[in-house]
Image (cartoon, rainbow, N blue to C red):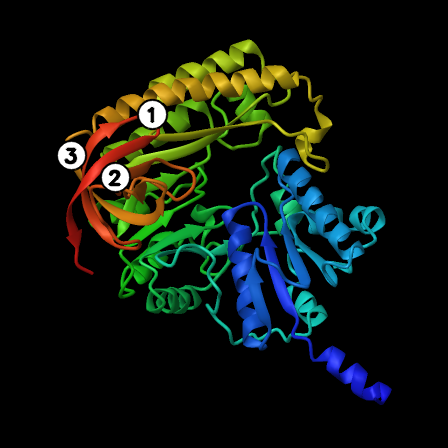
Amino acid sequence: MPDSYKMRTKTLKKNKINVVTLGCSKNVYDSEVLMGQLKASGKYVVHEEKGNIVVINTCGFIDNAKEESVNTILEFAQKKEQGLVDKVFVTGCLSERYKPDLEKEIPNVDQFFGTTELPSLLKALGADYKHELIGERVTTTPKHFAYLKIAEGCDRPCSFCAIPLMRGKHISVPIENLVIEAEKLAKNGVKELILIAQDLTYYGLDIYKKRSLSTLLEALIKVEGIEWIRLHYAFPTGFPLDVLELMKREPKICNYLDIPLQHISDSILKSMKRGTTQEKTTKLIEKFRDLVPNMAIRTTLIVGYPGETEAHFETLKNWVKAMRFERLGCFTYSHEENTTAYALEDNVLEEVKQKRASEIMDIQSQISWELNQEKVGNTYKCIIDRKEGKYFVGRTEFDSPDVDNEVLIDASKYYVKQGDFVQVEITEAADFDLYGKPVQTINQ
């Protein structure tokens, strides 16, 4: 058998590209765009399954996320050494931020790419970057909901945050492109759009010279098939209040807002460069609730920031008790190099950080339990996400996937279909879960 023939048969093996996603919903979106591009070039691409070529989309946000990303890279570099995979490529935030270090420490990786190097990554995978593919993605979420990234990057100067180092300045996606993308998603069965960006409230300032989130929402609610539009990651300063007017009158926009507030002590907020105060933040939340009375507000807080004293923490605790947020998550401060807070001494002990985070979550758990009790006996429109164990699992408009409360329906008594909207009567409530029975499926 001639050598050339042997070589040819070897190269006939179809490459299977496995995309592995770590980190936040923005990374999920980026992986889906990458997979859409690869598919358009005729590549065989899978998400977190076995493949002989691996692309790891990393997170570099805080210590835990970085550790998970590094461990995943090492795991696949070892598999390459063992001959279980042929090639390993790394992209995303960690790669953007630490590329030279990673290249030196993990030489077994074929190539590292930053967050803006999609065309180069595609070239390395033997694919062409197709500019005309507006909205073409291979979605990895359940068929009925999808993330819609309306902007990239961030112009905010927050002292603790490394995102501008990894994602660059704020760049809005034009409204017409987002509408095309939403229409394509709706044709594929998506009923719920989750709008994401580093900062939704900044949307449009760069391309339309004014805050244009409400204009975008007006365009998206016209897309046939989209039933719910959910807002994630708003910033408290300069919040466009016309968005709330629209939320109040437009049933497609969920009465839900994810607005990370981070802290409430004035001196900590000043050091964090958040551009607001306790008084201003409290008034803003009161305004939200005044304009949209049944709105669910989700926030995140950081404890253990440099210089946070017991007095600062007491202020935060008391404020959480007073504000009674519907949803709340708490992070411990992570000391990130090249951020302005890195010049400060990371002087709160790790065990103190953990204790403070637990205290905040204990307070929130009680608040959540009390608010959930008020829902018993009421009926809510829910979207059914999946079946898990003995339950069908759904969500109300006040809950985002993966991070918020869920509605559990006993699968031994009732049948509901994934992706359907169902009216569910709440019969029982725990800290973070509601239990209910379906009373009506809403015809789509």
Label placed on residue 431: 1
In the depicted structure, whether residue 326 falls above or below residue 3: above
Q: Amino acid at mark 2?
A: Asp
Marks 1 and 2 close (CB-CB < 8 Å): no
* Residue 294 image position (x, y, % from top left): 23, 35
Q: Dot 1: what SS?
A: loop
* Residue 161 image position (x, y, % from top left): 61, 37
Q: Dot 2: what SS?
A: strand
Q: Amino acid at mark 3?
A: Asn
* Cα–Cα span, label 2 and label 3: 17 Å
Q: Is residue 241 left or right of residue 44?
A: left
* Within-10-Å neighbours for mark 3: few <14, some 14–19, many 20+: few
Q: Nearer the viewer, residue 118 or 14?
A: 14
Residue at 66% across / 69% down in the picture?
A: 122
Pointer 3 residue? 378
> What is the total number of numbered labels drawn onto the structure image?
3
Pointer 2 residue? 410
Q: Nearer the viewer, residue 60 or 175?
A: 60
> Which residue occupies the extreme front position in the image?
1
**Residue 80 seen in this snapshot:** yes
Mark 2 or mark 3, earlier in chain: 3
* Cα–Cα span, label 1 and label 3: 17 Å
Residue at 55% across / 10% down in the picture?
A: 310
